[in-house]
Amino acid sequence: MPAELKQDFAVMTRIVISLVAMVLAASAIAVELTDAQRAEIAERIQPVGEVCLQGDADCGGAAAAVASGPRSGEEVYNSACMACHTTGAGGAPVLGDVAAWADRIAKGTEVLYVSGVQGVPGTGMIAKGGCMNCSDEEIHAAVDYMIAGSQ
Ligand code: HEC
């Protein structure tokens, strides 16, 4: 190869190498993510549900909830009944209003349990006060709590 051609070839090689280096550098930048972005992506692509076996240490949320037993009457009242029975919305007898509760309590606790679980047809008192994940026992406890606080 003549010397001049050799030099041209060397220059071209250098140009090609630097082009390749630039492309590589650009692609390296493209995949560089912060930890926060990585966490965000992991959250977005995680499966909708997770199979969780009872006793699993790392996903025992549901098992723990079951283990903690039924909610107390006060807890159920505060989460499911309060909206109407603290404000009197739609004619709901207000907790602590002795006069409003006297005739109802006179019907007997069992009758009020049925009203709590099945609702009072034609009124704002819907079945279980709308708490469809409440057990009958939890509703009974809430009714007990309301009776105890209203006489
Ligand atoms: C959306 C409003 C609303 C919610 C929520 C609600 N109630 Fe009521 N509740 C009413 C109304 C209105 C009445 C009055 C019905 C009537 O006219 O006898 C009533 C009446 C009752 C009575 C008396 C029924 C009777 O036979 O005299 C009981 C007991 C009762 N509710 C329990 C509950 C419990 C327990 C919860 C929560 C788990 C709850 N309610 C949530 C609106 C509500």
Image (spheres, rainbow, N blue to C red):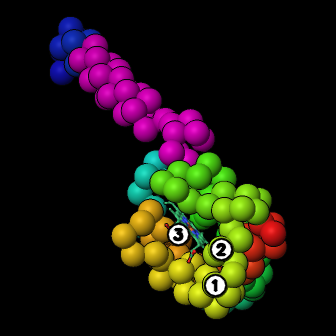
Q: Is residue 109 left or right of residue 41?
A: right
Compared with 132, 6 (above or below) is above
Q: Is mark 2 within 8 Å of ligand 1?
A: yes
Q: Amino acid at mark 2?
A: Asp
Q: Residue 48 placed where, x, y %?
A: 42, 67
What residue is shown with label 1? 107
Q: Quadrant of the C terminus?
A: bottom right
Residue toward you, 78 or 119:
119
Q: Residue at x 68, y 68 (%)?
A: 101
Specify the label residue 103 is tagged with: 2
Q: Residue at x 62, y 61 (%)?
A: 93
Q: Residue at x 66, y 57 (%)?
A: 94
Q: Residue 5 placed where, x, y %?
A: 18, 14
Look at the numbered disc 2 and give the secondary structure of its residue: helix
The magenta segment is 11-40
Q: Quadrant of ligand 1?
A: bottom right
Q: Is residue 29 left or right of residue 38?
A: left
Q: Residue 76 placed where, x, y %?
A: 68, 70
Q: Is mark 1 within 8 Å of ligand 1?
A: yes
Compared with 86, 55 (above or below) is below
Specify the label residue 129 is tagged with: 3
Q: CA distance from mark 1 to mark 2?
A: 7 Å
Q: Is residue 56 left or right of residue 120?
A: right
Residue toward you, 121 or 34:
121
- Say whether marks 1 and 2 touch (CB < 8 Å): yes
Circle 1 or circle 3, nearest the eye? 1
Q: Amino acid at mark 3?
A: Gly
